[in-house]
Image (cartoon, rainbow, N blue to C red):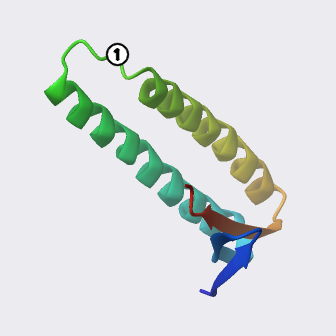
């Protein structure tokens, strides 16, 4: 995994090459599902911590994000299933861009 720290317009940025390579459909499904599960669990835990402090907080952002990620998970499942049925290899590249905010 390669990381780079740079400045752009006076802002500090970092890039993390998180996923990079060629995968079988099964391997790709495992990688993407793992990432999605971590993000879903992050929002579930955040929602829980928020509601522990304020029972009336509806956690709209977390709920919407969980729904969005679950939908993406369903779409990805179909995509990987079709690629596997066709015997295709998949290339995945995922870079995380982080910028320090003022």
In the rendered image, which quarter contains the C terminus? bottom right
Q: Nearer the viewer, residue 80 or 47?
A: 47
Residue lying farthest to the left in this orientation: 52
Q: Which residue is mark 1?
A: 58
Q: Nearer the viewer, residue 22 or 66?
A: 66
Q: Residue at x 42, y 54 (%)?
A: 38
Q: Is residue 6 left or right of residue 46?
A: right
The picture places residue 64, in percent across and down from the top left corner, at 51, 25
The local secondary structure at tag 1 comes to loop
Residue 96 vertical placement versus 68 (above, below) = below
Q: Quadrant of residue 1?
A: bottom right
Instruction: Give the total number of marks visible in the rendering.
Output: 1
Q: Quadrant of residue 96?
A: bottom right
**Mark 1 Cα within 10 Å, few/some/many (few <14, many 20+)?**
few
The picture places residue 90, in percent across and down from the top left corner, at 79, 67
Residue lying farthest to the top in this orientation: 56
Residue 89 vertical placement versus 29 (above, below) = below
The picture places residue 80, in percent across and down from the top left corner, at 71, 53
Q: Quadrant of residue 4?
A: bottom right
Q: Is residue 76 left or right of residue 36?
A: right
Residue 85 vertical placement versus 66 (above, below) = below
Q: Residue at x 67, y 45 (%)?
A: 76
Q: Residue at x 70, y 63 (%)?
A: 25
Q: Nearer the viewer, residue 10 or 92?
A: 10
Residue 102 vertical placement versus 18 (above, below) = above
The picture places residue 20, in percent across and down from the top left corner, at 71, 78
Q: Is residue 33 left or right of residue 86?
A: left
Q: Residue at x 22, y 25 (%)?
A: 51
Q: Nearer the viewer, residue 62 or 99?
A: 99
């Amino acid at each position: 995994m390669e990381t780079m720290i740079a400045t752009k317009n006076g802002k500090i940025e970092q890039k993390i090459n998180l996923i990079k390579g060629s995968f079988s459909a099964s391997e790709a499904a495992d990688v993407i599902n793992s990432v999605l599960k971590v993000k879903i669990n992050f929002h579930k835990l955040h929602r829980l911590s928020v509601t522990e402090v304020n029972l009336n907080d509806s956690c709209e952002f977390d709920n919407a994000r969980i729904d969005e990620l679950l939908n993406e998970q369903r779409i990805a499942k179909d995509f990987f299933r079709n690629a596997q049925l066709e015997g295709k290899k998949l290339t995945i590249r995922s870079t995380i861009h982080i910028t320090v905010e003022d």
